[in-house]
Amino acid sequence: MEPVAHIRSDFATKFGVPRQAGVVKELRSAVVFEPPYRTPEALRGIDGFSHLWLIWEFSENKGKGWSPTVRPPRLGGNRRVGVFASRSPFRPNPIGLSCVRLERVEWDAPGGPVLHVSGADLVDGTPILDVKPYIPYADSHPEAAAGFAPSAPGGALTVDIPPELLERVPPDRRDALAGVLAQDPRPSYQDDPERVYGFGFAGLEVRFRVQGGVLTVTDVAK
Protein backbone atom coordinates (compact mmCIF):
# COMPACT_ATOMS: atom_id res chain seq x y z
CA MET A 1 0.00 0.00 0.00
CA GLU A 2 1.05 3.59 -0.54
CA PRO A 3 -0.24 6.79 1.09
CA VAL A 4 -2.99 8.62 -0.76
CA ALA A 5 -2.53 11.72 1.43
CA HIS A 6 -0.78 13.15 4.49
CA ILE A 7 -2.27 14.99 7.45
CA ARG A 8 -1.31 18.55 8.35
CA SER A 9 -1.83 19.02 12.08
CA ASP A 10 -0.49 21.14 14.95
CA PHE A 11 1.46 18.27 16.55
CA ALA A 12 5.15 17.98 15.72
CA THR A 13 5.60 14.85 17.88
CA LYS A 14 3.48 12.15 19.49
CA PHE A 15 3.57 13.81 22.91
CA GLY A 16 0.40 15.82 23.43
CA VAL A 17 -1.67 14.11 20.73
CA PRO A 18 -5.10 13.12 22.14
CA ARG A 19 -5.37 9.38 22.77
CA GLN A 20 -8.54 9.08 20.68
CA ALA A 21 -10.07 10.96 17.78
CA GLY A 22 -12.87 13.37 18.60
CA VAL A 23 -11.80 13.93 22.21
CA VAL A 24 -10.69 17.50 21.43
CA LYS A 25 -13.18 18.70 18.85
CA GLU A 26 -11.52 22.12 18.52
CA LEU A 27 -8.43 20.65 16.84
CA ARG A 28 -8.21 21.51 13.15
CA SER A 29 -6.26 19.52 10.57
CA ALA A 30 -6.05 19.21 6.81
CA VAL A 31 -5.85 16.11 4.62
CA VAL A 32 -3.58 16.93 1.68
CA PHE A 33 -3.62 14.40 -1.14
CA GLU A 34 -0.62 13.07 -3.03
CA PRO A 35 -0.35 14.07 -6.74
CA PRO A 36 -1.97 10.93 -8.24
CA TYR A 37 -5.07 11.49 -6.08
CA ARG A 38 -5.42 15.27 -6.32
CA THR A 39 -8.50 15.14 -8.45
CA PRO A 40 -11.97 16.47 -7.67
CA GLU A 41 -13.48 13.37 -9.27
CA ALA A 42 -12.04 11.19 -6.48
CA LEU A 43 -13.91 13.30 -3.91
CA ARG A 44 -17.17 13.75 -5.75
CA GLY A 45 -20.03 13.51 -3.22
CA ILE A 46 -17.83 13.57 -0.11
CA ASP A 47 -19.25 16.92 1.03
CA GLY A 48 -22.56 15.16 1.63
CA PHE A 49 -21.07 13.43 4.69
CA SER A 50 -20.46 15.10 8.03
CA HIS A 51 -17.84 12.61 9.26
CA LEU A 52 -15.08 10.53 7.70
CA TRP A 53 -12.94 7.55 8.58
CA LEU A 54 -9.21 8.11 8.16
CA ILE A 55 -7.17 4.92 7.80
CA TRP A 56 -3.55 5.75 8.44
CA GLU A 57 -0.11 4.46 9.30
CA PHE A 58 1.61 4.65 12.69
CA SER A 59 4.66 5.98 10.88
CA GLU A 60 6.39 7.04 14.11
CA ASN A 61 6.44 3.40 15.27
CA LYS A 62 7.63 1.63 12.13
CA GLY A 63 10.29 -0.97 12.86
CA LYS A 64 9.80 -0.82 16.64
CA GLY A 65 8.19 -4.25 16.86
CA TRP A 66 5.10 -5.38 18.74
CA SER A 67 4.06 -7.48 21.72
CA PRO A 68 1.09 -9.87 22.16
CA THR A 69 0.09 -7.82 25.22
CA VAL A 70 0.11 -4.09 25.90
CA ARG A 71 -0.64 -1.75 28.81
CA PRO A 72 -3.37 0.74 27.83
CA PRO A 73 -3.28 4.20 29.44
CA ARG A 74 -6.96 3.77 30.41
CA LEU A 75 -5.88 0.99 32.79
CA GLY A 76 -3.20 3.11 34.42
CA GLY A 77 -0.37 1.67 32.37
CA ASN A 78 0.08 -1.26 34.76
CA ARG A 79 -2.42 -3.87 33.52
CA ARG A 80 -1.91 -5.89 30.37
CA VAL A 81 -4.48 -6.80 27.73
CA GLY A 82 -4.10 -8.39 24.31
CA VAL A 83 -2.86 -6.14 21.52
CA PHE A 84 -5.98 -6.98 19.49
CA ALA A 85 -8.14 -5.91 22.45
CA SER A 86 -6.53 -2.47 22.39
CA ARG A 87 -5.77 0.48 20.15
CA SER A 88 -2.07 0.39 20.90
CA PRO A 89 0.14 1.93 18.18
CA PHE A 90 2.58 -1.00 18.50
CA ARG A 91 0.87 -3.57 16.28
CA PRO A 92 1.87 -6.31 13.81
CA ASN A 93 0.66 -3.98 11.04
CA PRO A 94 0.96 -0.31 12.11
CA ILE A 95 -2.51 0.77 10.97
CA GLY A 96 -4.60 3.41 12.74
CA LEU A 97 -8.28 4.30 12.39
CA SER A 98 -9.81 7.68 13.28
CA CYS A 99 -13.27 9.15 12.86
CA VAL A 100 -13.11 12.90 12.18
CA ARG A 101 -15.60 15.61 11.34
CA LEU A 102 -15.46 17.03 7.83
CA GLU A 103 -15.59 20.79 8.25
CA ARG A 104 -15.26 21.72 4.59
CA VAL A 105 -13.71 20.78 1.27
CA GLU A 106 -11.32 23.31 -0.25
CA TRP A 107 -11.92 22.42 -3.87
CA ASP A 108 -9.65 25.07 -5.39
CA ALA A 109 -6.66 24.64 -3.07
CA PRO A 110 -3.21 24.81 -4.72
CA GLY A 111 -2.27 21.32 -5.78
CA GLY A 112 -5.77 19.89 -5.64
CA PRO A 113 -8.70 19.56 -3.20
CA VAL A 114 -7.97 19.57 0.54
CA LEU A 115 -10.18 18.13 3.28
CA HIS A 116 -10.40 20.32 6.38
CA VAL A 117 -11.31 18.17 9.38
CA SER A 118 -11.67 18.50 13.14
CA GLY A 119 -10.93 16.17 16.04
CA ALA A 120 -8.03 14.29 14.44
CA ASP A 121 -5.51 12.55 16.70
CA LEU A 122 -2.57 12.44 14.29
CA VAL A 123 0.98 13.78 14.23
CA ASP A 124 1.77 16.25 11.47
CA GLY A 125 2.83 14.41 8.32
CA THR A 126 1.13 11.11 9.17
CA PRO A 127 0.53 9.06 6.00
CA ILE A 128 -3.15 8.52 5.17
CA LEU A 129 -3.78 5.17 3.49
CA ASP A 130 -7.48 5.71 2.73
CA VAL A 131 -10.47 7.96 3.37
CA LYS A 132 -13.98 6.52 3.74
CA PRO A 133 -17.32 8.12 4.63
CA TYR A 134 -18.79 7.52 8.07
CA ILE A 135 -22.28 6.06 7.64
CA PRO A 136 -24.40 6.31 10.84
CA TYR A 137 -26.79 3.40 10.19
CA ALA A 138 -23.86 1.01 9.68
CA ASP A 139 -21.10 2.53 11.80
CA SER A 140 -22.99 3.69 14.90
CA HIS A 141 -23.88 1.08 17.53
CA PRO A 142 -25.02 2.83 20.73
CA GLU A 143 -25.73 -0.51 22.41
CA ALA A 144 -22.17 -1.80 21.89
CA ALA A 145 -20.14 -3.02 24.88
CA ALA A 146 -16.95 -0.98 25.36
CA GLY A 147 -14.82 -3.35 27.44
CA PHE A 148 -12.35 -1.54 29.68
CA ALA A 149 -13.20 1.85 28.09
CA PRO A 150 -16.96 2.22 28.73
CA SER A 151 -16.93 6.02 28.66
CA ALA A 152 -14.79 8.99 27.79
CA PRO A 153 -11.97 9.67 30.26
CA GLY A 154 -13.23 11.63 33.23
CA GLY A 155 -11.57 14.01 35.63
CA ALA A 156 -10.27 16.49 33.07
CA LEU A 157 -7.63 18.80 34.46
CA THR A 158 -8.25 22.47 35.19
CA VAL A 159 -6.02 24.43 32.83
CA ASP A 160 -4.35 27.67 33.92
CA ILE A 161 -2.64 29.63 31.14
CA PRO A 162 -1.36 33.01 32.36
CA PRO A 163 -2.68 35.82 30.12
CA GLU A 164 0.79 36.91 29.04
CA LEU A 165 1.52 33.36 27.80
CA LEU A 166 -1.88 32.93 26.19
CA GLU A 167 -1.14 36.02 24.10
CA ARG A 168 1.65 34.08 22.41
CA VAL A 169 -0.81 31.49 21.08
CA PRO A 170 -2.67 32.34 17.86
CA PRO A 171 -6.31 33.15 18.74
CA ASP A 172 -7.68 30.38 16.52
CA ARG A 173 -5.54 27.79 18.38
CA ARG A 174 -6.24 28.75 21.97
CA ASP A 175 -9.36 26.62 22.55
CA ALA A 176 -7.70 23.61 20.93
CA LEU A 177 -4.60 23.98 23.10
CA ALA A 178 -6.72 24.26 26.26
CA GLY A 179 -8.63 21.15 25.22
CA VAL A 180 -5.43 19.18 24.64
CA LEU A 181 -4.00 20.21 28.00
CA ALA A 182 -7.22 19.40 29.86
CA GLN A 183 -6.92 15.79 28.68
CA ASP A 184 -3.58 15.49 30.54
CA PRO A 185 -0.89 14.74 27.94
CA ARG A 186 1.42 13.15 30.53
CA PRO A 187 2.12 9.41 30.48
CA SER A 188 -0.34 7.73 32.82
CA TYR A 189 2.42 6.46 35.11
CA GLN A 190 3.97 9.90 35.75
CA ASP A 191 2.69 12.18 38.51
CA ASP A 192 5.57 14.36 39.64
CA PRO A 193 4.26 17.85 40.56
CA GLU A 194 7.73 19.36 40.18
CA ARG A 195 8.42 17.99 36.72
CA VAL A 196 8.04 20.34 33.76
CA TYR A 197 6.72 18.74 30.58
CA GLY A 198 6.82 20.17 27.09
CA PHE A 199 5.53 19.47 23.60
CA GLY A 200 5.26 21.13 20.22
CA PHE A 201 1.94 22.62 19.21
CA ALA A 202 1.20 24.92 16.25
CA GLY A 203 4.86 25.85 15.90
CA LEU A 204 5.21 26.62 19.61
CA GLU A 205 6.90 24.84 22.51
CA VAL A 206 4.37 24.61 25.33
CA ARG A 207 5.69 23.78 28.81
CA PHE A 208 3.61 22.93 31.84
CA ARG A 209 3.44 21.22 35.21
CA VAL A 210 0.55 19.50 36.99
CA GLN A 211 -0.28 19.60 40.66
CA GLY A 212 -3.49 18.69 42.46
CA GLY A 213 -5.66 18.44 39.34
CA VAL A 214 -4.49 21.81 37.99
CA LEU A 215 -2.28 22.07 34.92
CA THR A 216 -0.31 25.32 34.82
CA VAL A 217 1.41 26.47 31.67
CA THR A 218 4.88 27.74 32.59
CA ASP A 219 6.13 28.87 29.17
CA VAL A 220 5.11 29.24 25.54
CA ALA A 221 7.97 29.83 23.12
CA LYS A 222 8.63 29.59 19.40
Image (cartoon, rainbow, N blue to C red):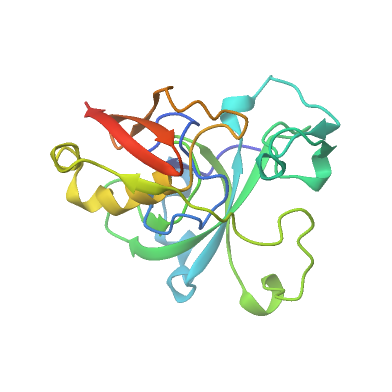
Is residue 161 visible from the viewing direction of this image?
yes
Quarter occupied by residue 194: top left
Q: Position of residue 138 (x, y in %)?
A: 70, 75
Q: Residue at x 77, y 26 (%)?
A: 66
Q: Position of residue 57 (x, y in %)?
A: 61, 37
Seen in the picture, residue 220 relative to 169 is either above or below; the reply is above
Q: Position of residue 62 (x, y in %)?
A: 65, 24
| Horizontal side, residue 160 vs residue 146: left or right | left
Which one is nearer the viewer's eye here, 144 or 101? 144
Which one is nearer the viewer's eye here, 193 or 123? 193
- Quadrant location, the N terminus: top right
Quarter occupied by residue 71: top right
Q: Residue at x 30, y 54 (%)?
A: 175
| Horizontal side, residue 179 vs residue 85: left or right | left
Is residue 31 visible from the viewing direction of this image?
no
Residue located farthest toward the bottom when viewing the structure as drawn: 137
- Quadrant location, the C terminus: top left
